[in-house]
Image (cartoon, coloured by chain):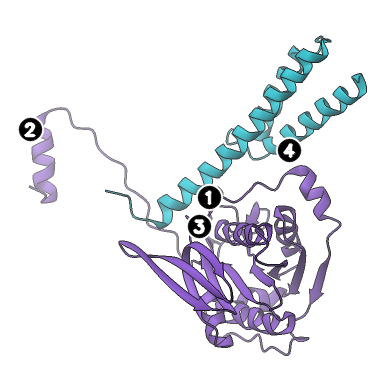
Amino acid sequence: MSGRVLVGVKRVIDYAVKIRVKPDNTGVVTDGVKHSMNPFCEIAVEEAVKLKEKKFIKEVVAVSCGPQQAQETIRTALAMGADRGIHVEVTGKDYEAMGPLQVSKIMAALAKKEDAQLIILGKQAIDDDCNQTGQMTAALLDWPQGTFASEVSLEGDKVKVVREIDGGLETIRINTPAVLTADLRLNTPRYATLPNIMKAKKKKIAKVNPADLGLDMTSRLEVVRVDEPPQRLAGVKVETVEDLVSKLREQGTL
Amino acid sequence: MANNLRGQVMRLYKTLLYLGREYPQGAAYFRERLKSAFMKNKDVTDPEKIQKLVARGDFVIKELEALYFLRKYRAMKKRYYEPEK
């Protein structure tokens, strides 16, 4: 039992930013757009830090894959209470093609290297909405998985996970090491305060290349095109009840 | 004593300024209001009163953090979860 938890954190376009699609439909505009940590990853970090505060685990390691800016996201995780960071540097073409499979390969490799007892991830990212990384990581490691967690408690070498499922909750008990993915109601992430961000600058972030881990980062997926959602049409004002009835008849709703 | 209070007030202002960067109506809007709120009390010299004002500032910090959390939580809930019946 190493008492070490790996937490994946992803840098995504901030949830409050209006997303614009590139004119050539190859993706979305990311230049000069505010980025922040994926909200579900924040929940995952909070859960890991809470487990550490309750002395169930010893160390929280935040991992992010991406270009230089991914370090900002790791810093936020460190400010929230993670002990150290690992920045897996993926840039250029590799970063554009990076999907859940590549990330889960990285997480699996790091979990073995760091001898992790738990991996906690957000259930999905708000940019690609894949909801696959946790499941794939568990599969690659052949570890049990507790996905969509809304409550987590460690019981010796087992983990009890209350999962959010359609129309209710499911409670499972799984062996460790395991992979958990955080759902929205798992906890309330703390705010990364200014003094804590300053303190986080002293914590260490190790830099790793996927090649160092012996990983093949090629993607077999091709993005064909990206489109904006259909625009909502403007409504019409009607003067009288007769107008309303005739308009509804026109549309075939009456 | 006076120096200690000065430090507290500075810390409060810095923290609030930092939090204001995410304010829904914009950082500029927030900064203006923040500054005028501090300037309004610039002539307060009674240490007890200053303590009280700092405590109120700390309360505002808590409120802002809660506001940001709720805003994000609601946005996520609206986007990813079915409305409760």
Q: Chain of mark 4?
A: B
Q: Which residue is mark 1?
A: A18
Residue at 79%, 77% in the rendered image: A208
Measure how far apart labels 4 and 1 are at the Cα level.
23 Å
Measure how far apart labels 4 and 2 are at the Cα level.
56 Å
Judging from the image, what is the letter of the chain drawn in cyan?
Answer: B
Q: Do callouts 4 and 1 mark residues in contact (Cβ within 8 Å)?
A: no
Q: Amino acid at mark 3?
A: Leu
Between marks 3 and 1 in the image, the one whose residue lies nearer the viewer: 3
* Residues beneath discs 4 and 2 located on the same chain: no
Measure how far apart labels 2 and 1 are at the Cα level.
39 Å
Between marks 4 and 2 in the image, the one whose residue lies nearer the viewer: 4
Residue at 92%, 23% in the rendered image: B3
Q: Amino acid at mark 2?
A: Glu
Between marks 3 and 2 in the image, the one whose residue lies nearer the viewer: 3
The numbered mark at residue A242 is 2
Between marks 2 and 1 in the image, the one whose residue lies nearer the viewer: 1
Left or right: residue A173 compared with residue A177: left
Left or right: residue A237 compared with residue B73: left
Q: Which sits earlier in the primary sequence, circle 3 or circle 2?
A: 3
Q: Which residue is mark 3?
A: A186
Which class describes the residues within 10 Å of circle 4: few (<14), some (14-19), or many (20+)? some
Between marks 4 and 1 in the image, the one whose residue lies nearer the viewer: 4
Measure how far apart labels 3 and 4 are at the Cα level.
27 Å
* Residue A230 % position (x, y): 37, 56
Q: Chain of mark 3?
A: A
Q: Which residue is mark 4?
A: B18
